Image (tube, coloured by chain):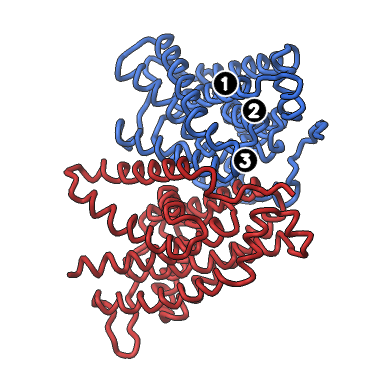
Amino acid sequence: MDYLYHLGVLFCIYVILAQGFNLVFGIAGLFNLAHVATYAIGAYTTALLAVELEVGFFQCIIASSLMAGLLALIIGGISLRLATDYFAIGSLAFSAVVSALLINWRSLTRGVLGIPGIPRPELLGIDFNQLSNFLWLSAIITLLALSSFWLICNSSFARSLKALAQSEHAAQTLGRDVARYRTWAFFISSLYAGLAGALFSYYLNYVDPSSFSLAEMVLVLTIVVVGRPGSFLGVCLSTFVLVVLLPEGLRFVPLEASVLGPLRQFLNALLLLVLIFINRARLFPTQRAV
Amino acid sequence: MEILPQLLVNALIAGSIYAIASSGLSLAYGLLRILNFAHGHLMMVGAYLFYATRILLDASLTVAGIVTALGMTVIGALVMWFFVRPFSKFSPLLTFVSTLALGAMLEASVSMLFGVNVHSISRGIDFESYEIWGVFITPIQIVIVVSTLLILGLLAAVIHRTSVGRTIRALSENQYAAQCLGVDYERYTAVVFCVGILLAAYAGVLVGLETNIQPTMGNSYTIKAFAAMVLGGLGNLWGTVLGSYLLGLVENLSIGLDFGGYSLPAGYKDAFAFVIILLVLLFKPEGLFRRRSRRV
C-alpha cells in the first residue's frame, strides 16, 4: 500500500513540473532547457530553509517558487530579448551554472553528498511523516496548482503566447510585447517548477545534485511531447503513463540497476524521438507566412 | 608571476581542442540553422569508438584512427538522415528536441555498453613532458596544438580558396539564392555536417588522450562549443575559432591566478564557459567579432 502512496506523490510532483514546462514549451514555444535547473533551485531552497533555518512548510514552498521564478526572470531578461535560438543556448548555460554550483559550492550545498534530514511538516496536528497523510497534502497542493494552471491555459495571456509562437510579427503588430509576454511565461512556468522542487524535497527528505540531471530534462520533455504540447489533459495523462506505468513495467525486467537507469533514459529519449518523428508536421505551429 | 607562461600554454591547448570541437558546430549552424545539442555527445562517441578499437581490440594507432573516422562518417550520415533532415522543414523546435534526444540516447547507450566509469585511451603514448623556457608540455599536447593549426589552415584554404568553399559560403549567406543558382543544398549540407561530426570526433579523441573519457563528458563539451560559438557570433566560423581560444584563456586564467589571496577552486573552471555565454548574451549578443555578411 505504501508503494501506491509513493507513486501517488511522485505523480503529484511530476504533474506540476510537467505542466509548468507545458506552458513555456508547449504553449509559448520556447525551448527552455533550464526547467530542471529551476526545479533544483526550488528543491534546494526548501532543503536549506527547512534544515538550516527551520522555516515552516508554507513559507518554504512560497520561497522556493519565488526563488525559482526570480532566477528565471533574470535569465529571461537576458536572453528573451533575442531570437529564440539564443534563449535555448542561454537556458542550457544557466542549467549548467546551476549544476556546477550545486556540486562545487560545498559550504552551502554540501556538494555531491547532498542535504539530508529535511523534516516533513507538521500542520494542524497532523503528522505528515505518515505517507498517506503526505499524499493528501500533495494532492491538495497539486489540485490547487493544476486549477490555477487551467485558468492560465484558458486566459487571454495563453492565447497571446500561442499567437506569438505562430507568428511573432503578426502578434507584435497587434500590440503584444514579445519579450515581456515570453518572460512572464518563463517566470510562471518556473514558479511551478520551484513548487514541484519544494514538494520533492519534503517528500524524499534528501536532495543531491544527481536528481537534477539532463536525463530528468529529457523525461520532462518526453512527458510534454507525449501528452501533446499545449494540451492540459494530455500532459496529465502522459505524466501518469511515463512516471507511474512505464517504470512499473521496467521493474519486472530482470536487469541490474546500473543498466536499468541508462535503459530508462534511452527508452524515454527513443519514445520522444519516435513521437516527434510521427507528428513532425503538426506538433508545433510552424511560423505562419503572412 | 612565473606561473603565467604555463597558464598561457594550457590555455592554448584547451583552446585548440575547443576550436576543433566548435568549428564543426558553427559550420553546421551556418548552413542548416540548427543547434545541434548532441555535438558534445558525438564527440564522446568518437572517443569511445577510438577506445573500443585501440584498447579493447588492441589495434594500432593508425587503424584505430581510420576505424574511428569511418565509423563517425557513417554515424554523421545517419544522424543527418534520421535526426536532422526529417525535421528541418518544420518548426526549428523539432531539431532542438531531436538532437537533445539523440544526445540522451548516445549517453545512455555508451553507459550501457562500456559502463559509467572513467576510461583511459592513452596506451602507448609518451607522457614524459619537456621543459621549454620553464613551461612543461607533453608530446601529445604539442600534437594537439600543431594539428589544430593544420586542420584550421586546411579548413580556411578549402572555404576561401576553392569552388566548394565558395558554394558553402554562398549557402550560409543566402540559402535560397544559392539554390536558385543550382546548388545542391541537400548534398552540401550532408557533407558539411559529416565534416563537422568528424572534427568533433577528433576533438573527442584529443580530449581522451589528454585526460580520459566518460559517458557524461558530452554535455559539458556541447555547452563549451556553444559558448565559443556565442562568443564568436552564431554561424560565424572564424569568430567561433577565436572564441574557442578566448574561452580556453578565460578558463585557465580564472583558476590559475589568485585574486588577492583568493583563487577560484578548480571545480568552477567549467562554470566559466556558461557564465561567459550569459554575459555575452547580455552585453553583446551578436558576438564579439563582427561578421561581414550580406544577408538579404
Q: Which residue does the image show at 43% across and 71% down from the upper left? A: A46
Which part of the image, by quadrant, shows the C terminus of chain B?
A: top right
**Who comes first in sequence, dot 2 or dot 1?**
2
Report crowding for label 2: few under 14, some 14 to 19, many 20 or more residues within 10 A (C-alpha): many
Spot the blue chain and give its letter. B
Residue located beneath label 2 in the image: B27
**How many C-alpha atoms fall within 10 Å of the one at disc 3: few (<14), some, or many (≥20)?**
many
**For the point 26% across and 77% down, which residue is it?**
A129
Q: Residue at x 59, y 41 (%)?
A: B90
Instruction: Locate the N terminus of chain B and report the quarter of the image it occupies.
Output: top right
Lower position in the chain sequence, tag 1 or tag 3? 1
- Residue position for label 3: B227
* Measured Cα–Cα span from mark 2 to mark 1: 9 Å
Determine if marks 1 and 3 fall on one subunit.
yes
* Chain identity of mark 2: B
Q: Secondary structure at mark 1?
A: helix
The residue at which mark 1 appears reads as: B195
Q: Chain of mark 1?
A: B
Front: mark 1 or 3: 1
Identify the residue shown where x is 30% and y is 35%. B112
